[in-house]
Image: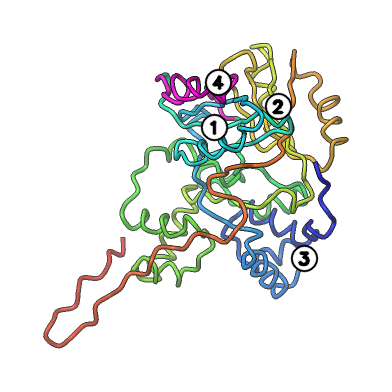
Amino acid sequence: MANVSADSVLSLTDQRLVAALQCDGRLTAERAAQVLGLAPATVRRRLHALAANGTVRVVISPVARPRNGGSAGALFLRIRVLRGKLDTIVAALAAREDIPFIDVTTSGDEIFAVARTEPGSPNPLVFRQLPSTQAVTSLESATILHVFRLTSEWRHAVLSPAERTALTRADPETGTRTRPGITGSPGLYGVDTDPVEQSLLDALAPDARLSAAALAAHTGHPETTVRRRVAQLAAQGRLVTQVLVDPHRLGLPIEAKLLLHVAPDHLAAAGQALADHPAVHGAFATSGPSNLHAAAYFPDLSALYGFLSQDLTGLGIAQVETAIVSRAAKRTPPLGGHPAPAPAPVTRRRRSATTAAPSSPSAG
């Protein structure tokens, strides 16, 4: 794997701003400046530059933590293919809407993917389509049983604990600081989203940092309503944001997939220990002999070795298999690039003397 040049790694200031956005995707420049000890003008300028060139995007997270960490229905797939057919299979998988994540490993013939599915149901991709594909030489699938850590919950370790606490929103029920990406408290699950809230979430999906004025223009709701409703969604933990940035730009060019075999009486503790580790951006209990899957970012191979030889000790792990990712073939939403266009603004008809004005959007 080629080394990342120093020029491609963001400055420490920019990395700290990325980490601040991970704490609160709609963080104001003034608040970031206050906590990080920067000038507000500097924060505004750097955030604008990072967004304008597509280095950083803040979106509404497409995946939220299920209640009590349970699985919403997904499979980990490990697919080996004939050499020379890798790109063909990757392209076919990437075209599927039920495949949100695809990674290719350095072995050159191996693909890791996540497939959405109905829990307990026979998945056609696993049962028929992939096995009948001649280019596929082997297929392993594992059901996600429990979520310990989602990528949207990962925090780049460049802030102090005090800074991270100051930048993270407080849980509305407990008063404790929570990570954006955890969909509020258990009491908020199942809350119906009314049309006003849904229109705001839809408009924020490709760009969660849209201003209240821009949201008002896109949705047709009064700006005062937009401000109040967005504040309510955030306070209730239902405005779940995710920062999209290439980890190479953060000085983390090594991504490893870990397949671990853990004794049942150590599974919960080992999973939580992985979730709490600053390098780990995904940790899941799964079916199969490798009953704990994890993904982690590292600055170099020495750091990965230290993680394997030191940080995993004492967790009841009987076996670990490590695969290094050569490229992330698909991410939903995609990393990098410019954000998807926001919904078209609502066009309001002009009021005339002969036509009554249309009813205004609900203020909610």
Mark 3 nearby-residue class (10 Å; few <14, some 14–19, many ≥20): few
The reply to whether dot 2 and dot 3 touch (C-beta < 8 Å) is no
The reply to whether dot 2 and dot 4 touch (C-beta < 8 Å) is no
The residue lying at 33 percent from left, 69 percent from top is 346
- According to the picture, the residue beneath numbered tag 4 turns out to be 142
- According to the picture, the residue beneath numbered tag 3 turns out to be 37
- According to the picture, the residue beneath numbered tag 1 turns out to be 114
Quadrant in which residue 113 is drawn: top right
| Residue 317, position as x, y percentages in the image | 74, 16
Residue 139 colored in magenta in the image: yes
Q: Which residues are magenta?
A: 121-147
Q: Is residue 192 left or right of residue 11?
A: left
| Residue 188, position as x, y percentages in the image | 43, 40
Sequence-first tag of 3 and 1: 3
Q: Is residue 337 above or below residue 98?
A: below
Residue 278 seen from this side: no
SS at badge 2: strand
| Residue 289, position as x, y percentages in the image | 63, 13
SS at badge 3: loop
SS at badge 1: strand
